[in-house]
Image (spheres, grey):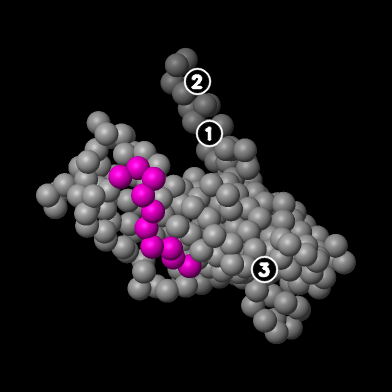
Amino acid sequence: MKTKTFLLLFAIGILTACDLDNDRIKGHAVIVDNFKDKNPLEGVSIELKYTTDEGYNYNFLQSVTTDKNGYFKIDAEYKTDFMCIDCWTVAEVYSDLEHTDTLGNFGFQFANNTYSYKTIHLDTFSLSHKIWIIPRIINLEGFQPDQISIDFYNCDLVDKSKKEIIYSGEVKVNQTFTPVELEMNMNTQHWLSYGTRELARGSLKKDAKEIAFGYFKLEKSKRTVEGDTLYLDFNVEKTK
């Protein structure tokens, strides 16, 4: 009897799994020129495509266009392998249907911490623009390092040579470091709306050995305009 029950449950699991190889994406948003003037962009083309092989090849899925209010809506479904870890989607944004100019791109995340479908976690996008970010120490948890290295691993810097900054000397609370220029593109706007906002990793060292690490987190990021300056705040990540 137990064997029959097990086989029945196993069969139900297999049938259920067969329905899980379809991924659904949905959501809606508005695109404006910038967050100061907030002029909606009409006729912008958003093309959705997906990959099942880690981005080596992409398949077209859906195309939508913004209306006079800059509004667009996505609702599409595509077939993947069961629990495919090499599958993802990306939305490419063009100035018009002829792809005259590329305005940016963005990805998707699962809604409300579930795995039912993927969605856009942002109500409004602006066009790509540049801002300045200043790394700042907020909390050292009592550590007294003589060096800190800052790795901007999670953002697009205008000057790629500034990706890693190493500062030697006394490191203290409220200390600031050299400003760096960040490209606030659509994907960064989107990621910051639902992600951890951790744009850089900080490694604290004493006598050339790492004693602690933490992350630089951008607090105010959703409505930036060209030339804004924001702080990137560092807190120690407690370890065992």
Bounds of the magenta segment: 172-181
Mark 2: secondary structure: helix
Indicate left or right for 145 with 43 as reference.
left
- State yes or no: residue 158 in magenta: no
In 3D space, how far apart are the residues under numbered discs 1 and 2 (Cα atoms)?
12 Å
Judge the density around disc 3: few (<14), some (14-19), many (≥20) Cα neighbours within 10 Å. some
Q: Amino acid at mark 1?
A: Gly
Pick the front one: 146 or 43 = 146
Q: Amino acid at mark 2?
A: Thr
- Give the mark nearest the N terminus, 1 or 2: 2
Which residue position is annotated with label 2? 5
Residue under the image location 50 percent in, 20 percent down: 5
User: Which tag is nearer the camera, tag 2 or tag 3?
Assistant: 3
Q: Which image quadrant is residue 173 in?
A: top left
Pick the front one: 36 or 126 = 36
Judge the density around disc 2: few (<14), some (14-19), many (≥20) Cα neighbours within 10 Å. few
Residue under the image location 16 percent in, 47 percent down: 206
Residue under the image location 66 percent in, 55 percent down: 223
Which residue position is annotated with label 3? 127
In 3D space, how far apart are the residues under numbered discs 2 and 3 (Cα atoms)?
57 Å
Which residue position is annotated with label 1? 13
Q: Which image quadrant is residue 164 in?
A: bottom left
